[in-house]
Image (cartoon, grey):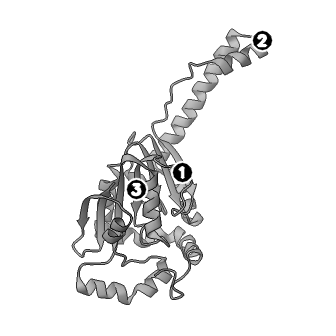
Amino acid sequence: PSSSPRFPSEDVRRTTFDGLATGYDKEVGLHEYLLGIQRRRKRLVKQAKGRVLEIASGTGRNVDFYTQGCCNEIVFSDFSQGMMDVLKEKVAQSDLGKRYDYQIRRQQQLEQERRARIRAAAPNTATAAAAIAAEDSEPPSVVETQLRFQTMNAAAMPYEDDSFDTVIDTFGLCSFEDPIKVLEEMKRVLKPGGQLLLLEHGNSDWGFMKDMQAKHLDRHVHKYGCYWNREIEGLLTEAGLKVREVERSQLGTLYYIVAE
């Protein structure tokens, strides 16, 4: 259990994630490419729709896979501030972020033009202010996808029940102190009929891989803050989630899951 003195506390692992953040993309990039993880990320994210909550966003390795107009809103979240800092910078430099920045500025311009027209039609300051307040015909939004950021502990999400159409988590279940609680929170904030999209790594079905994961577990947790041999499907069952689709990699360590 992660609460054992044998393993680092959640606070210690948060510090580990903060320290890994700036060099994380360089460290895992080649590994993800060779294992086909980027392809799986793209396939998973392509299914996102509506209002989206991405859990454990890390350094934003999914950002480039959100296509134009795919979703009404995307909330990127993580409990590591170091990871969030890298994520925000990456989003700002991405096509997704640049479109959002342009559309926000265009929306502000349209609002300024609307207010200028009202003031021109009503030179009296008080009359113009009243007209602006009463004006119903605000310019239609030109923002396709709202982008937001939330630093939070996924075991206690600051959102009401039934808030999101899609919840995405890629390689996060290995890093949560209480993965069952986090899955229950994901289920709570999903709207009825919403979808939970997961790309995870867990305990292998292959004996030699399972032995290797167990043998090196302590070192891996202390270095990366990651419990890489959790029983992913068992966690989903315990959290009361219904799995619609599951796909395992050749070594049985990668899990591509669609649940509700």
Residue positioned 46% across, 72% down in the render = 175
Picture quarter containing residue 220?
A: bottom left
Q: Amino acid at mark 2?
A: Asn
Q: Secondary structure at mark 3?
A: strand
Picture quarter containing residue 54?
A: bottom left
> Where residue 73 appears, x then y in whole percent?
47, 43
Q: Amino acid at mark 1?
A: Tyr
Residue positioned 77% across, 11% down in the render = 124
Crowd tier of the residue under label 2, counting other residues whose Cα lies within 10 Å: few below 14, some 14–19, many 20 or above: few
Give how far apart the Cα atoms at labels 1 and 3 are. Answer: 15 Å
On screen, residue 255 above or below 97: below
On the image, numbered disc 2 is attached to which residue?
124
On screen, residue 224 above or below 78: below
Of labels 1 and 3, the one closer to you: 1
Q: Amino acid at mark 3?
A: Ile
Crowd tier of the residue under label 3, counting other residues whose Cα lies within 10 Å: few below 14, some 14–19, many 20 or above: many
On the image, numbered disc 3 is attached to which residue?
168
Between 180 and 107, which is closer to the camera in this rendering? 180
On the image, numbered disc 1 is attached to which residue?
159
